[in-house]
Amino acid sequence: MIADHLIEILRCPLDRSELHRASADLVAKLNLAVAAGTLKNVAGEAFEKPLDGGLVRAAGDLLYPIIDEIPVMLPDEAIDLGAFN
């Protein structure tokens, strides 16, 4: 698990906004899409591994996945939550 003090200093690489942990319900829904092969990142690539969690930017529109306990903070690897819902 990522320590709270680390999340406090991490920022969205696109707009420098604050990030917060994704809810367990959201992560569960995303992992259902991973299992179905339908979850894609902003670059259009499908996820092969389930997410351990996610960091959502302040606007609530992008989620940076946490995979193998490592936050993936690359903009192309983010999940567009607007397109997901």
Image (tube, grey):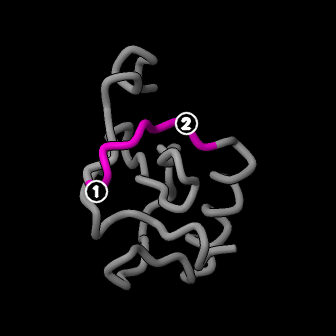
Residue in view at x 45 percent, y 18 percent: 4
Image mark for residue 45:
none
Question: What SS does tag 2 mark?
Answer: strand
Q: Is residue 28 left or right of residue 18?
A: right
- Looking at the image, residue 40 sits to the left or right of residue 23; the answer is left
Query: Which residue has dot 1 on it?
Result: 14
**Magenta residues (range):** 14-22
Amino acid beneath label 1: Leu
In magenta stretch: residue 15? yes
- Reply above or below: 71 against 61: above
Q: Relative to 70, is 79 above or below? A: below
Disc sitting over residue 21 in the figure = 2
Q: How many marks?
A: 2
Place of residue 1 in the rendered image (x, y in percent of width and height, measured from the top left)? 46, 26
| Local SS, label 1 | loop
Q: Is residue 54 visible?
A: no
- For the residue pair 68 and 41, the one nearer the viewer reads as 41
Tell me which amino acid carries mark 2: Arg
| Residue at x 35% of width, y 81% of height | 45
Q: Quadrant of residue 33?
A: bottom right
Percent position (x, y) of residue 34?
Answer: 56, 70
Q: Residue at x 62, y 75 (%)?
A: 84
